[in-house]
């Protein structure tokens, strides 16, 4: 049996999965690395001037010692040698690296003592210091190679950095990482609790999530989760209302069908049977039309619906739609006409848009009385395409305008049968095409006008512009 199967908590330590704990530990490691780099920078660029000043002070002390020697000729060389060995020993640098140069002259500039190499100015890397005794007039010049500074501070800084790094790695980093791990586990426990609380919820529980205590760090996450749940509650309420309305809408025509079927079965005369057959056929037609509309509004309301755009002449396409429904209008002696001003190329989904136009024309034909008029108008301008279906029928009272686009809503006491879905379908389809649908007075300020504003499609080529 593997360790992961015996200890389920080890599964959360997988290195291939994102982890906030590892992220916090990585930040700690990065911080330690930055500290080490900063120490190195401080050692090389800040402490180096301090070392230089210390070396200059040693040169001054060395020169002062040569000024005070009573017999420079015999004592200068041993003093210099002893000082060099002492410096090499104290600073732990290789012997000979601290070779010093000196030159001692009296008041008459006679050479009293000197090293084999004189302390001459202008030599790169050689620091020269001169001193003079005002009482005796003796002058001293001493020099040292500044590579001694670099070597000394290189050795010392590396040693100090190593000691600091080892001490930090052994004494500081492990406790910091361990405490960080524990603090991360403790600090992130509200997220794990929140995950368990959400996981234990039932699928139909869409109530807002309330976390106690309310940590400000997870407040944005809770806010967005609750916003999502609110949207889902809205969608769920719409679906429930939709099914309830659909069931109610189908109940009446089905009841009529049952009644007519019973009358047909019990009718004694041929005339009664013929009437029952016609009524039964009408009931079946209404049920069939409602089912088609239910399928249409379900399809156009789906978020995954993708329009199949085609660039067509909207004028010719609209003439075909009006022509298919014209016989119904003529049967009711309704004057139906189409007014366009030439071709109008536009990119749209012909099958989906046909559902919208057919519903608008079907409503107009059903509600306009015999002898009425229906006029379909198409206008293409530079900034918009307008499609208007206007009639001189009874129209819609102003008191019902606010709810007329609700699914299954019908004006009370309406004499014509219907499902209350036509305008809702048309509005949704127009929105899918990026347009707007509005209502207003119809022909001669009577009836109803459905105005559709469409944006000119950039992919539709050139429109014929009307003025």
Image (spheres, helix red, strand yellow):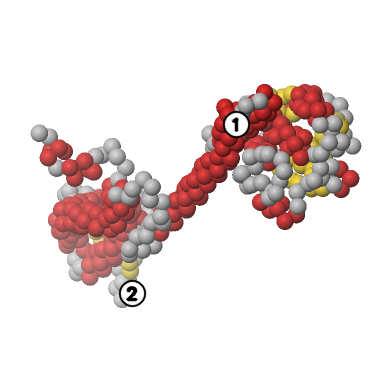
From the image, which quarter does the C terminus lie in?
Answer: top right
Up-down relation of residue 402 to residue 72 (above or below): above
Tell which of 112 and 161 is nearer to you. Answer: 161
Position of 283 with respect to 136 (left or right) is: right
Q: Which mark is residue 134?
A: 2
Name the spot of residue 446 as percent of width and height, x first. Answer: 85, 47
Quadrant of the image occupied by residue 15: top left
Label 2 Cα neighbours within 10 Å, binned few <14 / some 14-19 / many ≥20 = few
Q: Quadrant of residue 136?
A: bottom left
The residue lying furthest to the front in this view is 268
Q: Which residue is at 19% across, 54% downward?
A: 178
Helix, strand or loop at mark 1:
helix
Q: Position of residue 54 (x, y in %)?
A: 28, 63
Examine the image and state in which quarter residue 366 appears: top right
Residue linked to disc 1: 263
Question: Residue furthest toward the left?
Answer: 1
Q: Quadrant of the N terminus?
A: top left
Residue in front for this viewpoint, 98 or 156? 156
Q: Residue at x 75, y 49 (%)?
A: 396
Q: Which mark is residue 311?
A: none
Identify the residue shown where x is 32% and y is 50%: 201
């Amino acid at each position: 049996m593997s360790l992961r199967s015996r200890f389920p908590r080890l599964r959360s330590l997988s290195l291939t999965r994102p982890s906030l704990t590892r992220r916090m530990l990585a930040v700690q490691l990065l911080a330690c690395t930055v500290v080490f780099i900063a120490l190195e920078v401080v050692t090389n660029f800040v402490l180096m001037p301090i070392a230089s000043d210390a070396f200059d002070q040693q040169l001054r002390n060395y020169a002062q010692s040569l000024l005070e020697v009573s017999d420079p000729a015999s004592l200068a060389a041993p003093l210099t040698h002893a000082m060099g060995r002492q410096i090499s020993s104290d600073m732990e640098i290789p012997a000979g690296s601290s070779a010093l140069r000196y030159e001692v002259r009296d008041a008459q500039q006679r050479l009293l003592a000197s090293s084999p190499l004189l302390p001459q100015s202008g030599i790169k890397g050689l620091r020269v210091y001169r001193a003079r005794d005002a009482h005796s007039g003796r002058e001293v010049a001493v020099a040292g190679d500044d590579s001694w500074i670099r070597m000394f501070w290189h050795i010392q800084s590396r040693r100090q950095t190593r000691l600091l790094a080892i001490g930090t790695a052994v004494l500081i980093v492990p406790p910091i990482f361990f405490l960080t791990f524990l603090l991360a586990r403790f600090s992130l426990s509200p997220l794990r609790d929140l995950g368990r609380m959400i996981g234990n919820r039932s699928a139909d529980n869409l109530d807002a999530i309330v976390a106690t205590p309310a940590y400000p760090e997870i407040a944005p996450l809770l806010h967005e989760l609750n916003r999502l749940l609110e949207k889902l509650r809205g969608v769920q309420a719409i679906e429930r209302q939709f099914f309830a309305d659909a069931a109610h809408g189908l109940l009446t025509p089905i009841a009529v069908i049952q009644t007519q079927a019973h009358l047909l079965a019990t009718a004694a005369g041929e005339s009664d049977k013929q009437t029952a057959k016609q009524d039964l056929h009408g009931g079946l037609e209404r049920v069939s039309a409602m089912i088609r509309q239910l399928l249409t509004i379900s399809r156009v309301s789906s978020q995954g619906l993708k329009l199949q755009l085609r660039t067509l002449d909207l004028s010719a396409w609209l003439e075909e739609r009006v022509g298919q429904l014209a016989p119904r209008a003529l049967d009711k002696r309704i004057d139906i006409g189409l007014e366009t001003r030439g071709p109008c190329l536009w990119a749209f989904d012909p099958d989906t848009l046909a559902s919208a136009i057919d519903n608008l024309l079907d409503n107009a034909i059903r509600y306009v009385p015999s002898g009425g008029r229906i006029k379909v108008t198409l206008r293409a301008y530079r900034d918009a395409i307008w499609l208007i279906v206007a009639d001189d029928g009874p129209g819609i009272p102003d008191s019902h305008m606010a709810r007329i686009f609700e699914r299954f809503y019908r004006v009370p006491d309406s004499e014509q049968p219907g499902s209350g879905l036509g305008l809702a379908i048309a509005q949704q389809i127009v929105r899918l095409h990026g347009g707007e649908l509005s209502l207003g007075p119809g022909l001669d300020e009577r009836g109803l006008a459905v105005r559709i504003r469409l944006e000119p499609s950039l992919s539709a080529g050139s429109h014929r512009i009307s003025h």
